[in-house]
């Protein structure tokens, strides 16, 4: 289908964009547009105005500072994928980004856009939560930093205020004994996952000391399974036990491709698959 | 507050300069290109899944259905009609040789994606080629012949 009627405004600066948005509740920011424009074409969203921020300079900076990797909001997935600093500091991000859509979409889709859009089926919000990332916002009242854990409030819903804009994401680096393992099940390479897991593991003497399980495409936001992680640490992986625990602590929401029961099953086996990757 | 439902843009398509075109804010680039006669760009799903509308914008393969015409202001675009370089002839010949098209609807997108694969200047296994073209749907061939054509094109060109 075609997008609904809206007006278009090309922002001249970050401040200009924020000011415009604060005056119009129904306006939205347009960055890469690779999630927003499909939603418009499918008439799932009917904003009054698209504020084009894609040509603002300085927002696609990638740098390493104070043991943290900072990715500017407008860095495209392709730019992040091919960035030497990223590949040196957080190499797993490359493997995750390869699963984000297809080359032609990664050339346009932005890192910050994916974080801010809060699609529960997207990889990057779950990655940000697993990494304990800091989301950097700029607003009329100045800068604000929100922990990724507190950033996602619901389906496509975040803590960004109407007079704020996401300008970058800060990823504190992992400790030497910390690892990110990642796996997902999808029907076609690059499609949205039926269920996915990003696990952050801290090892001590080859045993799991800390575990953070963050699922995507299972509920209305990145889902953290705290209780299940405790059970895995204490008792190891057992399909039935893990499934029972996940079922009691997370609410699985079905979609076109998979029922809640299917997602529960996939989430359970993903934990096993991810842990096996760790042994390699 | 400015209310701009129409936007004036200038851009280049296949070397041809277009100045001060008035476009609707809601129109996507694929429709604009077709309305200007570049009908090689095919519009399929309009949600970024099928890949038929893939074009090149400022040197990179992008989905023309997921870019607004207004965003194309100042850009340099190439569509499937715009390639007269020898490498595109090799790719096209290989598509013909291997029967890598039947109805031809996906072919412009497949050719643009093949061009992007070739530009990466590295070796690809058949599995990697499949991953690269996973963003392009073909409902006729079953992909086998398309992978054959791309594989031979990479061999011929590099």
Image (cartoon, coloured by chain):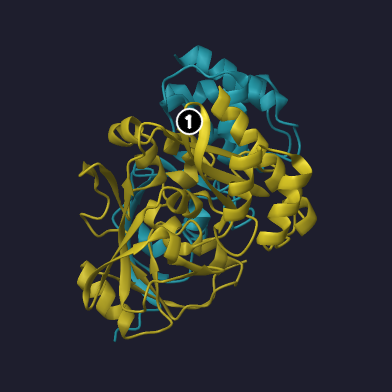
Chain colours: A yellow, B cyan
**Residue A174, can we see it?**
yes
Residue at 48% x, 34% y: name it: A95
Residue A99: x %, y % from top left:
54, 40
For the residue pair A11 and B73, the one nearer the viewer reads as: A11
Residue at 44% x, 81% y: name it: A48
For the residue pair B127 and A260, the one nearer the viewer reads as: A260
Q: State the count of labels.
A: 1
Residue A222: x %, y % from top left:
54, 58
**Relative to A20, is B18 above or below?**
above
Q: Quadrant of residue A20?
A: bottom left
For the residue pair A249 and A256, the one nearer the viewer reads as: A249
Q: Which residue is mark 1?
A: B115
**Relative to A34, is B2 above or below?**
below
For the residue pair A113 and B151, the one nearer the viewer reads as: A113
**Where does the C terminus of chain B fall, quadrant-wise?**
top left
Asked whether, in this view, residue A140 is left or right of residue B52, the answer is left
Tag 1: Cα neighbours inside 10 Å, few (<14), some, or many (≥20)? many
Residue at 45% x, 78% y: name it: A6
**Residue B37, can we see it?**
no
For numbered disc 1, what is the local secondary structure?
helix
**Relative to B86, is B1 above or below?**
below
Q: Quadrant of residue B136?
A: top right
Asked whether, in this view, residue A7 is left or right of residue B102, the answer is left
Asked whether, in this view, residue A161 is left or right of residue B62, the answer is left
Q: Chain of mark 1?
A: B
Residue B121: x %, y % from top left:
41, 21
Residue A272: x %, y % from top left:
67, 36
Q: Quadrant of residue B104?
A: top right
**Where does the N terminus of chain B fall, quadrant-wise?**
bottom left
Residue at 42% x, 72% y: name it: B25
């Amino acid at each position: 289908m075609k997008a609904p009627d809206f007006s278009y405004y090309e922002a001249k600066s970050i401040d200009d964009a924020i000011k415009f948005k604060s005056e119009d509740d129904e306006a939205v920011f347009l960055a890469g547009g690779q999630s927003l424009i499909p939603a418009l074409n499918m008439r799932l969203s009917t904003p009054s105005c698209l504020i084009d921020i894609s040509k603002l300079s300085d927002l696609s900076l990638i740098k390493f500072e104070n043991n943290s990797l900072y990715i500017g909001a407008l860095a495209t997935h392709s730019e992040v994928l091919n960035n030497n600093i990223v590949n040196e500091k957080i190499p797993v991000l490359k493997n995750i980004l390869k699963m984000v859509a297809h080359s032609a979409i990664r050339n346009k889709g932005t890192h910050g856009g994916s974080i801010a859009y809060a699609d529960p089926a997207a990889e990057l919000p779950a990655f940000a939560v697993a990494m304990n990332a800091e989301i950097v916002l700029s607003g009329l009242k100045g800068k604000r930093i929100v922990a990724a854990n507190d950033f996602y409030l619901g389906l496509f819903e975040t803590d960004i205020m109407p007079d704020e804009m996401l300008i970058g994401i800060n990823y504190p680096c992992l400790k030497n004994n910390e690892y990110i393992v990642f796996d997902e099940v999808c029907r076609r390479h690059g499609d949205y996952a039926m269920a996915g897991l990003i696990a952050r593991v801290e090892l001590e003497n080859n045993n799991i000391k800390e575990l953070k399980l963050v699922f995507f495409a299972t509920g209305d936001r990145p889902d953290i399974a705290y209780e299940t992680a405790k059970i895995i640490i204490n008792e190891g992986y057992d399909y039935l036990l893990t499934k029972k625990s996940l079922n009691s602590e997370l609410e699985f929401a079905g979609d076109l491709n998979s029922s809640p029961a299917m997602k529960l099953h996939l989430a359970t086996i993903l934990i096993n698959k991810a842990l096996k990757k760790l042994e390699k | 507050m400015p209310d701009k439902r129409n936007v004036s843009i200038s851009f280049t398509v296949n070397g041809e300069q277009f100045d001060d075109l008035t476009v609707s804010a809601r129109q996507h680039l694929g429709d604009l290109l077709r309305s200007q006669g570049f009908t090689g760009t095919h519009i399929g799903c309009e949600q970024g899944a099928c890949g038929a509308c893939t074009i090149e914008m400022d040197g990179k393969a992008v989905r023309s259905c997921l870019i607004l015409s207004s965003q194309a202001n100042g850009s340099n675009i190439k569509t499937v009609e715009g390639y007269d370089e020898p490498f595109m002839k090799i790719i096209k010949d290989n598509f013909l040789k291997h029967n890598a098209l039947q109805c031809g609807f996906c072919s412009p997108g497949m050719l643009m994606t093949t061009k992007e694969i070739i530009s990466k200047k590295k070796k690809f296994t058949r599995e990697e080629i499949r991953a690269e073209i996973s963003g392009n749907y073909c409902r006729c061939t079953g992909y086998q012949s398309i992978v054959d054509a791309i594989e031979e094109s990479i061999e011929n060109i590099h």
